[in-house]
Amino acid sequence: MQSADEVYSRHVLIFIAFGVGIAARSFIEGNFADMLKLISTSLIIPSVYMAFGVLMRNSRLFETIFIITWYIGPLQKTYPFDFVDFTGMNMDFSVVAIISAVSFSLVLFSCFRRHFACR
C-alpha cells in the first residue's frame, strides 16, 4: 500500500504536468504570478481530497471527487473549478494567497489526523 505523501506527491505532479504549457508560456512572458497561481492551485485540489480521505478513512470518496473535479473544471472549462486557467479568467493575488493557506492547512490537518489515528 502506498503512503499518503506518495499519493499526494503524485497528484500534485499530475496537476503541474497538466498545466505545464501554461507554466511555460508564463515563464517565457515573465508572468510569475500565473506560475504561482498554477502551483498553488496544483496543491489545493490534492490537499482537499487527501483531507477527505483521512476523514472518511477510505479512498473512494477521494477518487470520485478527484475525477468529477477534473471533468467539471479543466475539461469542461467551468470557471470556479478551472484551476488550470483554461477559461482565461484571472484570479487576484489575494485569492491565490488564500488558496495556498488553505492548502497548507489541509495538509497539516491530514498529517496530524493520520499521525494520531495510528496511535
Image (tube, helix red, strand yellow):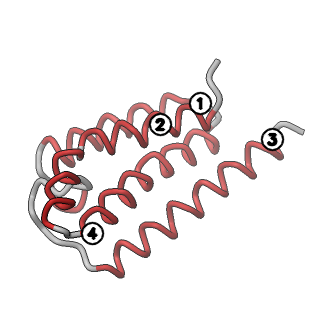
**What percent of the width, then of the height, locates residue 30?**
19, 69
Q: Which residue is mark 2?
A: 62
* Left or right for 97, reference 81: right
Crowdedness of circle 1 by 10 Å Cα count: few (<14), some, many (20+)? few
Residue contact between numbered discs 1 and 2, judged by CB atoms under 8 Å: yes
Residues at marks 4 and 2 touching, judged by CB atoms closer than 8 Å: no
Counting residues from the N terminus, which is met first, the one under dot 3 or under dot 4? 4
Q: Of 50 and 84, which appears nearest the observer? A: 84
Give the mark toward the camera: 3 or 4. 4
| Badge 2 density bin: few <14, some 14–19, many ≥20, Cα 10 Å | some
**Measured from the top left, where is residue 38 in percent x and y?**
30, 58
Q: Foreground: 111 or 26?
A: 26
Q: Quadrant of residue 82?
A: bottom left
Q: Is residue 12 left or right of residue 8?
A: left
Image quadrant in which you'd find residue 76: top left
Mark 1 belongs to which amino acid? Asn
Q: x, y (%) of residue 104?
A: 56, 62
Is residue 80 depicted above or below 24 in this figure?
below
The three-letter amino acid code for the residue at tag 4 is Phe
Indicate the quadrant containing the N terminus: top left, top right, bottom left or bottom right.
Answer: top right
- Give the residue pinned by disc 4: 32
Which comes before the other along the chain, label 4 or label 2?
A: 4
How much space separates mark 4 and mark 2, taking CA atoms?
31 Å
- Residue 58, label in figure: 1
Rendered view: 76 above or below 79 = above
Q: Judging from the image, what secondary structure is the residue with disc 3 in?
A: helix
The residue carrying mark 3 is 117
- Alpha carbon distance from label 4 to label 1: 37 Å
Q: Is residue 95 left or right of residue 55?
A: left
From what the image shows, is residue 19 above or below residue 104? above
